[in-house]
């Protein structure tokens, strides 16, 4: 039997075939030498089948195809009595990748990066892999300014044709920014422009922000920030001439130099519209808020263009294009701005596609959508739909894309894409406040029960003052019109012995039902009823007012409560608002023939407005009134209190207002609360220096608080208001919200219990 070697080396693929083979018909194919690779894989890539006629050209094609897989170090093709024999020598496989010496990045991060680059365990190995490993790791470390990095890779052979890749990393010192210079600035101080940049030289907060580490991406972003600043302040000819980055020979210090040409500031001379006006020009002209004589601003120009596009979108022009084109007069330093309008075709929505909701039912999303299918496209309704879906809290990300329907010019599909978040929580928490001291809390909740949008929760907490258990269930769409219905059952215990409030203890049990009715997109009303049973304990040192109430009404009371409320929410964000308002009116009425009869009415509001790009002004106020009726007095444990975080900082928690008196008529330190309350304040919120606006979870503020409470019969006088100012910090930390304040009383009176430093860690129930 004779075997003919048709090819044995890769060079034969790219040069004339060294062997002349007489064509023959393949009656069988055999594969030899495979270990990990299945023979079927070879057959799959082999371009020759049984029954094919092979010659030198077909053999060459087969060799190229098998080498191209990357699975084999050597391939030979032989024939034996018209049987084609494929002899392969496999490349080794990567059995293990180990990393040592790394501190900046964990092994998981490095291995994930290598995997994304096509290098992972079980992959085929060749020598070029080691070079790729080194380059990928170096590129990753360069993003963190490790210019002294050294990477050494070795491959150790293992049994069964496998290798282990060992990566030894010597990170070296981090290169930090030593100096940043901006050359050519005259209209603004260099310090002002440096303040616009994310990259900085090493400072107090560099250990936290790491902004003293050079990054090409960050530098490009900073240059665009400087460009935007100038273009928004009239400098239409502004240009960045060059940016140079140099590093010292020891690769530890980075120097950045930026050269700019400011040009001269321009003013607006005229603003006009051009193009096709399918919406009346008089209507569009209302959005031309830029006036002659104003300083040229790219952001202002783009803002007007966006509003014009949105207005056209409200009438169905989903793909309207509005371009502001400034014509610069360099001699007069003025700009004539023309907005060219191309509305495109008016379109209606053919279909709304929901994508990404693996857990949530389609209905949960569609009931929040305000844009209807088969109706004209309305940009305002589309945007409102997006906001409403986001407010459900079920999704991390919500996007809406317009997609033209192929073959038509007047139809569009909306693709509403969601990225679901975990809505089930099992929580164990620890909180601390100066009033409650240590608070332990636990709970289990599911805010999207079985994908229906309904919520079920059980929460419990225990502290020195308050202890509570609460079971609640809510159906936000009890009716198709969006009327919600909620049930709750609760138990609460209160003991004021550790507070400034006069000593008492209560234990309450109750259950209730409530409904929420949407009136408009931003307004809703609520009403409900509950049955409450409260047992009261008083002590020898309890105020006489409390003792008198118990003597008149007994230690136990069962009350039927009704509640009515109204809310309007126009904030741009529930978590980190920067603009808009929130208003809430509530009322609580104890109905006859209950043991107690009283009423409570309150109003609270918040107003947010941006002062600068990073600073927000918040104005807030709260008013409350309560009284008994039908010959009954207001239960003392339903009184209003003021002072402390969330009220008037700088004064001890619940310390403002009426106080108990001793036998001599002297005021004591025990607060009794009041039947009327006024609190309010102004607060400037801004990011932590060094974090800029990119991380709003940690914010600082300066505040001015005012407020007080008044008891029955006391005349309400604004001169009784206590006022304090100070500084605060809030942090939405991984373990829960944290609040710290440093308050200084500005208006106080003799006997007031002040407290400069106040804090609260975790959610206090």
Image: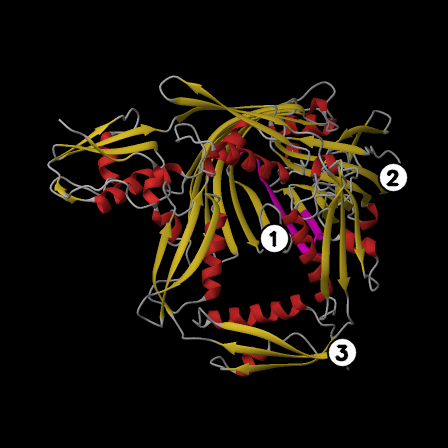
Label tally: 3
Give the residue pinned by disc 2.
Answer: 749
Quadrant housing the C terminus: top right
Q: Is mark 1 on a helix, strand or loop?
A: strand
Find the distance from the CA under tag 2 to the CA under tag 3. Answer: 60 Å
Instruction: Answer with left or right where residue 20 lies relative to residue 126.
Output: left
**Vertical side of 563 occupied by 164: above or below:** above
Mark 1 or mark 2, earlier in chain: 1
Q: Which of marks 2 and 3 is in front?
A: 3
Is label 1 in contact with label 3 (beta carbons under 8 Å)? no
Is label 2 in contact with label 3 (beta carbons under 8 Å)? no
The one of 12 and 160 positioned closer to us in this rendering: 12
Give the residue pinned by disc 3.
Answer: 333
Q: Main secondary structure of the magenta part?
A: strand
Q: In the image, which disc is placed on residue 583?
A: 1
In magenta stretch: residue 590 = no
Instruction: Answer with left or right where residue 583 lies relative to residue 417.
Output: right
Q: Give the range drawn in magenta.
A: 595-623
Q: Which residue: 82% across, 34% down?
A: 756
- Residue 435 placement (x, y as % from top left): 71, 27
Q: Which residue: 58% across, 39% down?
A: 139
């Amino acid at each position: 039997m004779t075997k003919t070697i048709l090819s044995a080396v890769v060079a034969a693929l790219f040069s004339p075939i060294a062997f002349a083979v007489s064509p023959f018909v393949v009656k069988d194919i055999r594969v030899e030498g495979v270990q990990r690779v299945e023979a079927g894989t070879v057959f799959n890539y082999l371009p020759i089948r049984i029954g094919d006629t092979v010659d030198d050209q077909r053999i060459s094609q087969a060799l190229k195809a098998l080498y191209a897989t990357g699975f084999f170090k050597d391939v030979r093709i032989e024939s034996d009595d018209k049987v084609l024999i494929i002899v392969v020598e496999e490349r080794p496989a990567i059995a293990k990748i180990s990393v040592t010496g790394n501190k900046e990045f964990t092994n998981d991060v490095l291995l994930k990066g290598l995997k994304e680059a096509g290098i992972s365990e079980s992959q085929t190995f060749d020598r070029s892999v080691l070079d790729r490993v080194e380059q990928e790791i170096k590129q990753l470390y360069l993003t963190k300014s490790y210019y002294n990095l050294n990477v050494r890779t070795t491959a150790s052979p293992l049994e069964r044709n496998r290798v282990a890749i060992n990566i030894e990393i010597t990170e070296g010192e981090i290169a930090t920014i030593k100096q940043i210079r901006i050359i050519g600035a005259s209209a603004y101080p260099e310090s002002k422009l440096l303040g616009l940049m994310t990259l900085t030289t090493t400072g107090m907060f560099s250990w936290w922000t790491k902004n003293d580490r050079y990054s090409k991406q960050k530098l490009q972003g900073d240059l665009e920030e400087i460009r935007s600043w100038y273009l928004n302040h009239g400098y239409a000819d502004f240009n960045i001439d060059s940016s140079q980055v140099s590093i010292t020979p020891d690769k530890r210090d980075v120097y950045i130099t930026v050269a700019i040409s400011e040009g001269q500031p321009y003013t607006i001379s005229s603003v006009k519209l051009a193009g096709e006006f399918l919406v009346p020009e008089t209507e569009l002209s209302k959005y031309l808020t830029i006036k002659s004589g104003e300083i040229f601003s790219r952001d202002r120009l783009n803002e007007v263009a966006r509003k014009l596009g949105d207005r056209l979108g409200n009438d169905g022009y989903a793909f309207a294009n509005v371009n502001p084109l400034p014509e610069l007069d360099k001699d007069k330093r003025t700009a004539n701005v023309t907005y060219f309008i191309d509305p495109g075709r008016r379109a209606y929505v053919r279909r709304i596609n929901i994508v990404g909701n693996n857990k949530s039912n389609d209905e949960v999303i569609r009931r929040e959508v305000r844009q209807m299918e088969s109706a004209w496209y309305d940009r305002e309704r589309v945007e409102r739909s997006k906001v409403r879906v986001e407010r459900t809290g079920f999704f991390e990300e919500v996007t809406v894309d317009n997609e033209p329907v192929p073959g038509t010019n007047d139809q569009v599909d909306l693709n509403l894409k969601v990225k679901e978040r975990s809505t089930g929580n099992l929580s164990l928490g620890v909180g601390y406040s100066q009033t409650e001291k240590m608070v332990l809390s636990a709970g289990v909740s599911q805010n999207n029960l079985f994908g229906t949008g309904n919520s079920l929760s059980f929460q419990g907490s225990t502290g020195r003052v308050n202890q509570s258990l609460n079971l609640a269930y809510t159906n936000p769409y009890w009716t198709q019109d969006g009327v919600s219905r909620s049930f709750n059952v609760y138990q609460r215990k209160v003991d004021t012995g550790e507070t400034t409030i006069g000593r008492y203890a209560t234990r309450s049990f109750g259950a209730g039902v409530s409904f929420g009715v949407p009136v408009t997109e931003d307004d809703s009303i609520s009403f409900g009823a509950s049955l409450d049973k409260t047992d009261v304990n008083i002590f020898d040192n309890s105020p006489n007012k409390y003792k008198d109430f118990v003597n008149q009404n007994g230690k136990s009371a069962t009350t039927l409560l009704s509640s009515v409320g109204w809310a309007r929410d126009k904030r741009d964000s529930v978590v980190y608002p920067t603009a808009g308002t929130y208003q809430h009116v509530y009322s609580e009425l104890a109905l006859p023939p209950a043991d107690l009869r009283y009423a409570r009415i309150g109003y609270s509001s918040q107003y947010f407005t941006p002062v600068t790009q990073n600073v927000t002004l918040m104005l807030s106020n709260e008013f409350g009134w309560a009284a008994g009726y039908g010959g009954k007095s207001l239960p003392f444990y339903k009184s209003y209190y003021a002072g402390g975080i969330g009220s008037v900082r700088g004064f001890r928690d619940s310390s403002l207002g009426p106080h108990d008196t001793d036998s001599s008529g002297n005021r004591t330190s025990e607060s009794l609360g009041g039947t009327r309350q006024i609190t309010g304040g102004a607060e400037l919120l801004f990011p932590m220096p060094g974090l800029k606006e990119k991380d709003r979870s940690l914010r600082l503020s300066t505040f001015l608080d005012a407020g007080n409470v008044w008891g029955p019969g006391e005349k309400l006088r604004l001169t009784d208001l206590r006022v304090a100012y100070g500084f605060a910090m809030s942090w939405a930390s991984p373990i829960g919200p944290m609040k710290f304040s440093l308050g200084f009383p500005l208006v106080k009176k003799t006997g007031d219990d002040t407290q400069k430093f106040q804090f609260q860690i975790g959610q206090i129930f």
